[in-house]
Image: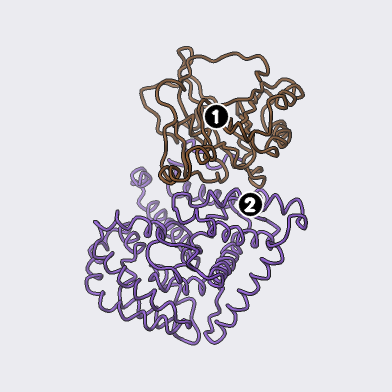
Chain colours: A brown, B purple
Amino acid sequence: MNQEMNGVEAERPLQKIDYVFKVVVIGDSAVGKTQMLSRFAKNEFCFDSKSTIGVEFQTRTVTINGKLIKAQIWDTAGQERYRAVTSAYYRGALGAMLVYDITKRQTFDHVARWIEELRSHADNSIVIMLIGNKGDLVDQRVVHTDKCCGVCRGSGPFFLRDFKINKVVSKRSLESNNGKNNIATLKGSKIDIISGPELDITEMKEVPSCSC
Amino acid sequence: MNNNSNNNKDTSTIGILDSRFNQTLRNVQGLLKGRSIPGKILLTQRVDPIDNSGLYSPTYQRSSSYSDTGTSDRATETVEEEVHSGSKPFGITNNSKLKTSTSHAENPTEEIRKSSIGGRTTDSARVMKFTKVLSGTMVILDKLRELAWSGVPDYMRPTVWRLLLGYAPTNSDRREGVLRRKRLEYLDCVSQYYDIPDTERSDDEISMLRQIAVDCPRTVPDVAFFQQPQVQKSLERILYAWAIRHPASGYVQGINDLVTPFFVVFLSEYLEGSINNWTMSDLSSDKISNVEADCYWCLSKLLDGMQDHYTFAQPGIQRLVFKLKELVRRIDGNLFLRPVVFLQIY
């Protein structure tokens, strides 16, 4: 599996990849899966966000403990109808990022359903990370971290965490903070959220359990 | 092709491969024929006229001149009149047009690009042919399809698409009446299913409406026009009406992108100039509902032929991916043997 994708991607030829880690991103529609991923892979926040059809993937290569690791992250469509297609991609994934929107109660209510999906289609050893996205919309938050812990304890071996990518902003937040005029100029442009090494991963942290 | 260099010991193999390839190409073309291809052709043309104007300045001058005349004719109600009066300006522009298109004729991609930006469609001979086909009491769809394959003049496109999709009847005597009836039917559907409180909807319907509402703001996000609230409401109504009438699939993400070409083409009958300057509030509610109804029916016709792309497990898409795999295997065995993931299902 690991070598499978190398034929498709344009990889810098001189680098030798030590590991390829396959990860899937799942969760309800419009929780920000694609944004989160493009933030990680390209450090972009894109205003022209379109719904994901079926499955797409992005990669990012990072060095951890002297090993070159390629994260091959599969981004999936959130709509139920695509589940038959997307669940086929769970196979062989080492990790799953299960994303919900902290401002939309329902996206959190569906978490159990998504875990069930993973249980029936993914490998048993898969590591699941629960991500409460749009953490910047604090004033609209309806899902609180204690709820997240509840899911966490009920699910046994999973590593779960309320995760907030540093400075990821949601479109709605920009709209409310900057006013209409700014949004018009921003629309259609891609903005760089961070500059510098903030996103660099230097080591993997071992987190034994829920970190909420 | 890689394939040929590897097989050149055996020329007959190449012959077979070539003929197979051509056959496949013909099949694909055959499949596409008669189906208006949704896509960004029109959008890119309207959005980036400045970018292209350097390259195709003569084309652009011409196309703007004809679209002006076209739009002034749009007020007229009957199809025939529209076609006749609109065809005249094309004759004037013809000569320069012919030169530009023949100079690029050897390069097929250039050719496609030209036709997509309205280059070949201004050829007066072609317009005459269109006019002839469209003005008869009975439109012969095979002929129209043949003609439309290499592009349709902008102002004729709404009429041609309605006909080719089988929405407007080929018989011109019946056309107006049928369209009126179908548009009313759409309005009924909207008032019966869309304009009702959520309490009268089932849970499935509510979640479908929610999914549509989530996707409309993300439809063609790079064109400002689509961010207008009225545009998003129109899209929502069309998509919901379609979804409710097609319970086997319901609304599926991606169908929103199939409506937009229809929406832009049918609006072009009422709104002039660049899409960047279009405002929905300039239109009467009658016109908006006509456009919506036309979109709804054309979307229905388009999807009729591929509904299994959107039903559970999407067998239609899997079948097409399988065909693609077979096609690659036939025309490029080496590529096929490489570890390419077509669709990681089994």
Question: Measured along the vertical axis of the image, is residue B131 above or below residue B287?
Answer: below
Mark carried by residue B252: none
Label 1 vs label 2: CA separation? 25 Å
Name the quarter where the C terminus of chain B is drawn: top right
Residue B175 position by quadrant: bottom right
Helix, strand or loop at disc 2? helix
**Residue plotted at (62% across, 52% down):** B212
| Chain of the residue on which disc 1 is drawn | A
Kindly identify which residue carries mark 2.
Answer: B315
Question: Measured along the vertical axis of the image, is residue B59 above or below residue B133?
Answer: above
**Residue plotted at (22% across, 63% down):** B103
Q: Crowding near pointer 1: few (<14 within 10 Å), some, many (20+)?
A: few
Residue B123, percent across and down? 30, 73
Residue B225, percent across and down? 46, 56
**Amino acid at pointer 1:** Met
Residue B258, percent across and down? 53, 58
Of A41 and B275, nearer the camera is B275
**Residue plotted at (47% across, 39% down):** A178
Mark carried by residue A1: 1
**Amino acid at pointer 2:** Pro
| Chain of the residue on which disc 2 is drawn | B
